[in-house]
Image (cartoon, rainbow, N blue to C red):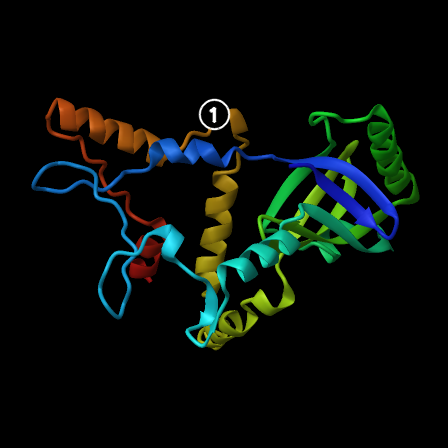
Amino acid sequence: MVTQIRHKLLNIPCMLVNFVNSRAYDSEVLHQYSKCCLDRVRYKKICEKCDKEVLNPDILKGTDNEHILTIEQQERLKEKLDNQTIEILSFELQTENFFTEKIPFTLIQKSQLILPSISKGYKKKDISIFLSFCEALKELEVYCKVKYTSRAKEHYGIITAKDNNLIFIELPFSNRLNYDNINKLKTAVENENCEANLKDFAKDYIKSNLKEIDYSTITEKKAILIKQYLEQAINPNELKEEKEIENPFIEKWNKN
């Protein structure tokens, strides 16, 4: 399905591409199997009242049992929400400290590359309009606040031109921020102080371990461990357990 960037009468076909391939994680999932037959265990949807299994065609949606949508209402709602659109809410100037002030890294949910649409029946004129729009944003140093609707779900975020790319950065809606819980947890330790000698030890520890690492050499330990255990399941042998390494800070704390 083609996504549209929209603002008033402006309508630009585009497509969003994930920077990270989330499907790669599927190969690492351990499924559930029964002890009796060593067969797959699936998830069933059960009605809480009559304890019967419910199939997808027999499931209705609503906020509670007094406000349940009919099948027709669900279809109409899905049609209205599932338009695959990026609605531009505003154009704003991109300040010098844009990437620290406007989009603190702690709030970034996801980032995606936006490319011109090359789906069936695309027009070269649409690609030209897309590229012109990107260049205009870059030269004017302007970014867009947007609402992206996909698969009946709304996402808030910004569109910015960076390193010759047009990027969508998803941010949380304000009502989903977890600040109350964070502040409560921070208050629980606000009267604690760091030890002066431990701080000096920490600085020396960090300085002595300063080094650069090649990103391409970093592997996922979970995938390696799962593979190792699965191989052991076929050819049982004693697994070599890693020795637990003592925490140098605990050792320093005990000495004090």
Extreme top residue here? 235
Q: Position of residue 84 (x, y in %)?
A: 67, 45
Q: Nearer the viewer, residue 135 or 235?
A: 135
Determine the residue located farthest toward the left in the rendered image: 36
Residue 248 visible: yes
Q: In which quadrant of the rendered image does the C terminus lie? A: bottom left
The reply to whether residue 193 is visible in this rendering is: no
Q: Identify whether 184 is placed above or below 19.
A: below
Residue at the spot 61% in from the left edge and 59% down from the top edge: 172
Q: Quadrant of the N terminus?
A: top right
Residue 182 at x, y percent in the picture? 51, 69
Which residue occupies 84% across, 51% down?
7
Q: Judging from the image, what secondary structure is the residue with disc 1 in?
A: helix
Image coordinates of residue 16 in percent, x first then y, are: 66, 37
Viewer-side residue, 84 vs 62: 62
Find residue 141 and report its image quarter: top right
Residue 36, quarter of the rendered image: top left
Q: Is 186 placed above or below 224 here? A: below
Residue at the spot x=55%, y=35% of the render? 20
For disc 1, the marked residue is: 217
Amino acid bearing label 1: Thr
Q: In the figure, is residue 128 to the left or right of 237? A: right
Residue at the location (46% across, 29% down)? 218
Residue closest to the far front? 72
Image position of 1 (left or right of 122): left
The front one of 228 and 110 is 110
On screen, residue 116 above or below 147: above
Q: Where does the image place residue 4, in percent across and percent down from the top left? A: 75, 42
Q: In the image, 125: left or right of 195?
A: right
Does residue 198 lie above or below 122 as drawn?
A: below
10 Å crowding of disc 1: few (<14), some (14-19), many (20+): few
